[in-house]
Image (cartoon, rainbow, N blue to C red):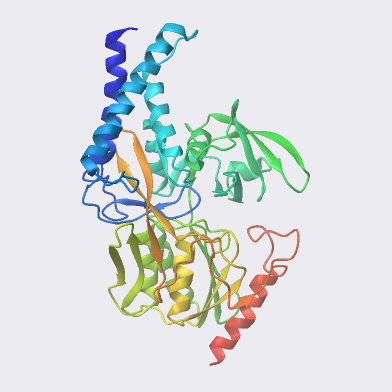
Amino acid sequence: MNEENGKTFSRGILLGILGTIIGAGLAFLLAWGFDWISFGPGPDLSGVISNNGNSTSSGASAGKSSKEEESVFYESLTSKGGYIKSIVDKYYLEEYEEEDLVDGAMEGMLAALGDPYTAYYDEEAFSDLMESSEGVYYGIGVVVQQDPETKAVRVVKPYTSGPGYEAGIEPDDVIISVGEVDVQGMDIDEVVAMIRGEEGTTVDITLYRPSLKENYTVTVERRKIEVETVEYEMLSQDMGYVGVSQFDVITTDQFDEALTALENQGAKGIIVDLRDNPGGNLSTVVGMLDLLLPKGNYTYLVDKAGNREDYNGEQDAKYNFPMVVLVNGNSASASELFTGAVRDYGVATVVGETTFGKGIVQQLFSLRDGTGIKVTMAKYYTPNGECIHKTGIAPDVEVSLDEGEYASIVSHEEDNQLQAGIEELKKRMAQ
């Protein structure tokens, strides 16, 4: 065994673990809150829970302190890791990079938790993850979502102005491979990081289309994607429509601008369409609710120790529209938080299908070497105290989209969920 290499590998593992623990006190600060929290099944991240940096072990053996448990853990990790490294050095046929072994060890450690939302990111993937929150990136312009059970990464919505849509990618397609890499079972953020890249470069993507029961491959040129997370229009003389595709940093301002424009055009009631919205930034959705609801609690989070963190509105509603919210099975996390809040406050009728059911949040920790981890660390609750994890929010008026149709591409006239929403909005406006 190369003793110096063995020491380097062991130190790498130990520093990675220590960095994870220390990261609680050094968490990456962004506009989404004090720390990051993932708020969607897709690559949608948000906002905030303070963490005092203490390390605990829920599986500690009786009679042992947490410090003793940590000592045993580090000793086992470095000793076993060093021994495996010596075998690799002596017998492994090919060349390798020590950094890849360290990244693999960290990735495997978190994967062993069995939580599809807890993951390790190498430096490039972590940088891409941070970039995605701003609503501007270089990629193919599709929204994706991961099944928490099968881990299949599925297309929810291709932006009609994006290169993915132009290449023929459709909703419900499942991503099988990116380039030569089979991505089945990989974390969604890793898959997204592989699809993104420098502007003007191309990426080969193989997808499975359930409707045809076959795979197909497309070559897509990466372009700058400036996500318009909010679209709006007047549906009639006094009724406005606002579609929100995801909750990014830029979305609150876009939502406010849309409501102002609709109000100026004579809207007396609005439909907010959150179908196929995979979630996003917690502080963004709270800011949007602050435009629509009176002062009060909009959601709260509870961590493993029972600590509660409240998110409250700071001002009375800027807009007082009668409202309908459209949802479906792909409306997740921040979409569900928004829906639960307007439902609990009684300001909107919910129309469509039961939502996805992701009522947990993840915090992002930045490590000193540029890598990072995302860890599930709290459940969120609606204002009335409901946790919707794995159950979702049932609509007030249940309407399934006609078979074979997709909310993202169907016309308003053929959209039976939207038409049902219009009828419900008429009722609210008449009250």
For the point 51% across and 33% down, the residue is: 194
Q: Residue furthest right?
A: 212
For the point 63% across and 45% down, the residue is: 165
- Which of these two is toward me, 23 or 110? 110
Query: Which x, y percent locates residue 425?
Result: 58, 82
Q: Residue furthest bottom?
A: 431
- Which of these two is toward me, 334 or 256? 334
Residue 397 placement: quadrant: bottom right
- Which of these two is toward me, 233 or 13? 13
Query: Which x, y percent locates residue 76?
Result: 32, 27
Residue 1, above or below 308: above
Q: Count the marks.
A: 0
Residue 174 placement: quadrant: top right
The answer to whether residue 179 of the structure is visible from this angle is no
Query: Which x, y percent locates residue 262?
Result: 48, 74
The answer to whether residue 227 of the structure is visible from this angle is yes
Residue 13, above or below 265: above
- Which of these two is toward me, 61 or 12? 61
For the point 38% across and 78% down, the residue is: 293
Query: Which x, y percent locates residue 7?
Result: 27, 16
Relative to residue 378, is residue 192 drawn left or right?
Answer: right
For the point 73% across and 46% down, the residue is: 210
Position of the N terminus by quadrant: top left
